[in-house]
Amino acid sequence: MSLNKTVLNRFLDLEVPDNITQATYVWIDGSGENVRCKTKTVMGAVNGLEDLPEWNFDGSSTGQAEGSNSDVYLKPVRIYRDPFLLGHHKLVLCETYKYNKKPADTNYRFTCAQVMDEAKSEVPWFGMEQEYTLLDKDLHPYGWPKNGFPGPQGPYYCGVGTDKVYGRDIVEAHYRACLYSGVNVSGTNAEVMPAQWEYQVGPCEGITMGDDLWMSRFLLHRVAEDFGVVVTLDPKPIPGDWNGAGCHTNYSTKAMREDNGIVTIEKAITKLAGNHAAHIKAYDPKDGKDNERRLTGHHETSSIHDFSAGVANRGASIRIPRSCAEERKGYLEDRRPASNCDPYKVTEIIVRTTCLS
């Protein structure tokens, strides 16, 4: 069942007094993969976090608390413009805290922020490439034949044409929603598997990377909702000879970006090699179990069991872009994180390994 959006627009066009703000609080639920939201009427303009009260929700319904002690606190941490309600209304990214005011189990932002503060002199920059797959309501890949498969992979990556790409309207709508909201989205493209897409967020410094990627995911699900389409971040949504979905993470420090930064990049890769198992565990919500289906050593992936690095090698754990090798400075790309990773966990462990160990 689809609702008529033209009817909705009639009501969204109704004037709301300037001294009333609809603030939609967004948070990560107990799965560590999904986002939830609810909206609060705030009296007055929202110009900063100080204008937003802490709130709470029923954690027993989100996998974050027992029913007998169900209140979980929402602490606003970042504000974005609302591309759905428009005007002065806001989206509010929140951290979650238990009844005793300690971080909820899936509040990985708390320790990530501490690590980014500790390493701020290194000026860590990140760019994350979020891959995802569009599905029909019946969870069949969007645009695929209902009784069969599309042609083999090859013509779909960065493709153009009705027979090569499915769902571009959703992609373009999401792109604009991100730009409007203030999410630092930097690009998008069709991916290798049909109905699979990618967008990139960054460069972002420190904790902003996780904030912007989580809000971009909320926006993606919310936009797809209006189109009646489902988004999955499953790392291997279709078994067999089809590409999986990752969240390749581009990373640099100030020293890497300066002349002869390749030396610092190579030192970082050596440290990453020595901590491979811990990174694999941090790179998907199921401690590496989701990535086992994706990191097979095939379909442009490294093996989950082995660490590797190389210039322009998309089959390696860590890729050094060819331009960086030639200029002897720049960044590295960690190709191991799964599409459903928590960006706070990913960026935290990368900084811990390369800067603080």
Image (cartoon, rainbow, N blue to C red):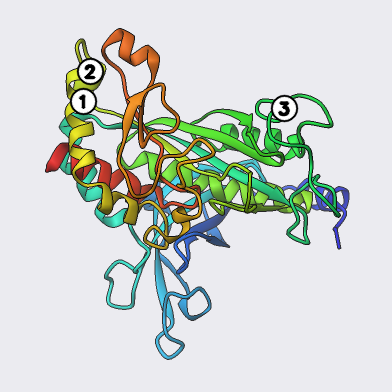
Q: Taking the image as drawn, is residue 152 in sight? A: yes
For residue 57, above or below residue 67: above
Work out whether mark 1 precedes mark 3 in sequence or the reverse, and give the earlier one: 3
Residue 284 image point, x, y percent = 42, 55
Residue drawn at 34 percent across, 74 percent down: 98
Left or right? Give the position of 305 relative to 261.
right
Residue type pointed to by label 1:
Glu
Mark 3: secondary structure: loop
Mark 2: secondary structure: helix
Work out whether mark 2 precedes mark 3 in sequence or the reverse, and give the earlier one: 3
Q: Which disc is residue 155 wearing?
A: 3
Q: Are marks 2 and 3 in contact (CB under 8 Å)?
A: no
Residue type pointed to by label 2:
Ile
Q: Are marks 1 and 2 in contact (CB under 8 Å)?
A: yes
- Looking at the rendered structure, the number of numbered marks drawn on it comes to 3
Q: Nearer the viewer, residue 205 or 7?
A: 205
Q: Which disc is residue 266 wearing?
A: 1
Q: Are marks 1 and 3 in contact (CB under 8 Å)?
A: no
- Residue at mark 2: 262
Left or right? Give the position of 353 relative to 78.
left
Residue 11 image point, x, y percent = 80, 52
Residue 310 image point, x, y percent = 33, 25
Q: Residues within 10 Å of mark 3 (few under 14, many from 20)?
A: some
Q: Residues within 10 Å of mark 2 (few under 14, many from 20)?
A: many
Q: Nearer the viewer, residue 176 or 296?
A: 296
Residue drawn at 79 percent across, 41 percent down: 150
